[in-house]
Image: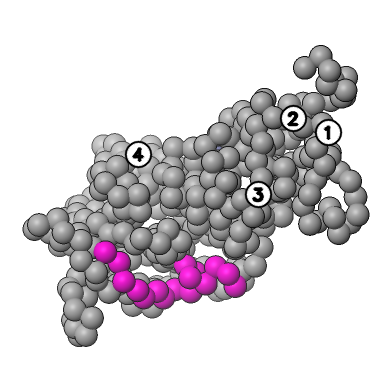
Amino acid sequence: MASDPDRSRPGVKQLLENAGNGSCADCGAADPEWASYTLGVFVCHSCSGLHRNIAHISKVKSLLLDPWSCSELEIPECLQRNTTFSHLEFMDSVGNAAAKARYEQLVPAFYCRPSPSDCMLLRDQWIRAKYERKEFMYVERQEPYSAGYREGFLWKRGRDNGQYLSRKFILSEREGVLKYFNKNDAREPKATMKISSLNATFQPGKMGTAHGLQITYLKDNSTRNIFVYHEDGKEMVDWFNAIRAARFHFLQVAFPGAPESEDAYARGEVFIGSQENRYSVLAGLPPNTQGSHWPFGITIATPDRKFVFACETEEDQRGWMSAFQMVVSRPMLPQDFAVEAYFKHKP
Ligand SMILES: [Zn+2]
């Protein structure tokens, strides 16, 4: 290393101190040690492996092991500009904050942004959606999961023998349901799941398949599960985000109701606006609430009054809190104000 001619110049590791570069551009893991020198982002070791799946767009190098100062950039963008950026200069000119502003400008609120602990499939598809398909730069590319309707075939695990069989699924926001059919030409669905009670989580370990999705729903007040997958990763993650979108749109307008208890909990629907418009969500119940012995309460404050809800478990409370947080953290759209007015004036 003594022969390195650029030793005295700032190295690539110093760029980690710039705002945004201290955590992985894609999953948020701390202290990235890799970088894509064609996209200009710093990523963790695990995400660098996923960037290799899109090698036509992203080329990665280790910050610690690979040379940085002398190599010239061969990306089209620079050739067009007729510049001779070194990889290092290019990393300096972009960085995680600028790349986020470019590639994540239109991430829908319901869309699952992966964390370091999320499964490989979610992180891989997030990286492909961001840089390869540029879904968050062009809103029309989000149609597979934001249109409010989705139809297709998934492999569904049989209840009795555990064998996976191809089943037709339909998600319809208008009908408020996800349903599947045992036969392609069947008129009646085998099961109808209300969007209000739907929850989907990837369970690759538990199901023994990398794209395995567990869908939980309520039927007759008890929790049911189905297990599905699709061989195509994009298809599976599109289904996952379509379910999240449907649930998000449902929660935006209404809360399905409190537990069936005798306590004086609000029943019916509550409009939830944005925190910018004096809506907020807090864990716990206000003091002196009737029935405040419920341990897992949630308080939704609106400009006019407070609504309290009780969850049966801490896990439910956390789930609902994060769903509500997602709603209040989002600015209200013009049509939301109309819905708000409707709820205010409802008898
Ligand atoms: Zn990462």
Mark 1 lies on residue: 70
**CA distance for labels 3 and 4:** 57 Å
96 left or right of 218? right
Looking at the image, is mark 2 or mark 3 earlier in the sequence?
3
Q: Of all residues shown, which one is farthest toward the top?
A: 2
Q: Residues within 10 Å of mark 3 (few under 14, many from 20)?
A: many
Mark 1–mark 4 Cα distance, whole angstroms, equals 69 Å
Residue 144 in view of the camera: yes
Residue 78 location (% of width, % of height): 84, 53
Q: Position of residue 73 (x, y in %)?
A: 80, 45
Residue 86 position (above or below residue 228): above
Q: What secondary structure is marked by label 1?
A: loop
The quarter holding residue 257 reads bottom left
The residue that mark 2 highlights is 67
Q: Earlier in the sequence, mark 1 or mark 4?
A: 1
The residue that disc 3 covers is 58
